[in-house]
Structures are given as structure tokens and as C-alpha cells.
């Protein structure tokens, strides 16, 4: 069984993230969406709200689960039986950031990383920008499916 871990802070989980998971299901038998605690980031949306939001998006898909973790992603993968890490790449900047992490993960735990490019329509969506729009009172419906679930 091929099981992939899709790690991130997902603050918020955007339509781009959703696209990567749905297309990842064509490559893997199961995808674990792993919401990690990133010590260098301060979250805007509550962790429990993020878990509920993401779980609701995949409620009809038994091959997707949502879990939280702290520590190394490779350790989480080993504990959950994930053989691959799934990541989305929007541009060269993402690749330059993700490549050394992927190489180190492979060295530390023999876990391969699979990179997917998002649907071109979703290419510009960025969680940091979505958070700024939200904090400034803007609507984020175009970038996040059912965003009201994050604040209710």
C-alpha cells in the first residue's frame, strides 16, 4: 500500500492544498493530511478549527485522514506508515525551499518526496496572502472552500 503524508501548517487549508490532495489520491492509496506545529509560525486559525475544516472537505473520501503532529515529519511518517511525502510546488522559490528538505528526508528516513504542480487556476493562491486578506477584512471564499468553518 502506498501511503503519502501531506504535511503543512495549513493556516488556512486553501483550494490549492485541496487540489494537491485530490490529485495525490490518483497516485497513492491513502493520503494523511498532517497538520504540523511549526515553531517559526504563529497560527491565525485555531488548530481544532483547521482539523474540522479539512476533515469536512474530505468527509466522503475514506482514503484521506487528518492528523496533527509536532517534531520531525519523517518521524511522523514512520509512525503512521507513510512511505512518501506529498508536496505542491507553485514556482522556483517553492522548489528551492523544498528540494533540500526532500533530500534530507530521504537521507534520514528513506522517505521519497513527490512534487505536484497545482492547477494553473490555483497557482497564485498562497496561505500567507490569504491570511492577510482575512485579517484586513477581505473575503477569502475564492481561495478557501467553506472558510466560515474556520471561524465558527
Image (cartoon, rainbow, N blue to C red):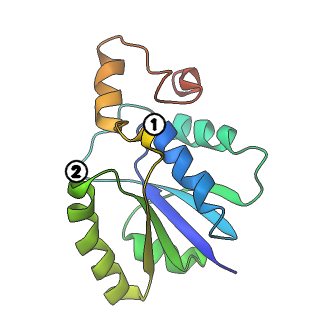
The residue closer to the viewer here, 92 or 37, is 92
Q: Which residue is mark 2?
A: 40
Residue name at image x 26 percent, y 62 percent: 95
Q: Please state the horizontal and vertical placement of residue 91, each as a whole percent of the image.
A: 27, 52
Q: Quick check: marks 2 and 1 in contact, CB under 8 Å?
A: no
Please indicate whether residue 67 sits to the left or right of residue 128 in the image: right
Q: Which residue is mark 1?
A: 121
The residue closer to the viewer here, 8 or 47, is 8
Please indicate whether residue 47 sits to the left or right of residue 103 in the image: right
Image height of 129 relative to 148, above or below: below
Image height of 49 relative to 26, above or below: above
Q: Please state the horizontal and vertical placement of residue 84, each as a whole percent of the image.
A: 51, 76
The residue closer to the viewer here, 105 or 23, is 23
Residue name at image x 57 percent, y 43 percent: 51
Image height of 91 relative to 108, above or below: above
Residue name at image x 52 percent, y 53 percent: 20
Q: Looking at the image, tell me whether mark 2 or mark 1 is earlier in sequence order.
A: 2
- Element type at marker 2? loop
Packing grade of label 2 (10 A; few <14, some 14-19, many >=20) is few
**CA separation, marks 2 and 1?**
29 Å
Q: Quadrant of residue 30?
A: bottom right
Please indicate whether residue 51 sits to the left or right of residue 73 in the image: right
Image height of 41 relative to 139, above or below: below
- Element type at marker 1? helix
Amino acid at each position: 500500500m502506498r501511503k503519502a503524508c501531506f504535511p503543512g501548517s495549513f493556516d488556512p487549508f486553501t483550494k490549492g492544498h485541496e487540489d494537491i490532495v485530490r490529485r495525490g489520491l490518483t497516485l497513492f492509496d491513502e493520503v494523511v493530511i498532517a497538520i504540523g506545529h511549526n515553531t517559526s509560525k504563529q497560527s491565525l486559525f485555531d488548530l481544532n478549527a483547521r482539523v474540522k475544516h479539512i476533515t469536512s472537505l474530505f468527509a466522503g473520501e475514506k482514503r484521506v485522514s487528518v492528523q496533527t503532529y509536532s517534531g520531525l515529519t519523517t518521524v511522523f511518517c514512520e509512525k503512521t506508515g507513510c512511505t512518501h511525502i506529498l508536496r505542491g510546488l507553485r514556482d522556483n522559490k517553492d522548489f528551492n525551499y523544498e528540494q533540500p528538505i526532500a533530500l534530507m528526508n530521504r537521507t534520514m528516513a528513506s522517505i521519497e518526496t513527490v512534487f505536484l504542480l497545482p492547477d494553473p487556476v490555483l497557482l497564485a493562491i498562497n496561505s500567507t496572502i490569504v491570511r492577510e486578506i482575512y485579517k484586513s477584512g477581505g473575503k477569502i471564499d475564492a481561495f478557501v472552500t467553506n472558510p466560515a468553518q474556520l471561524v465558527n
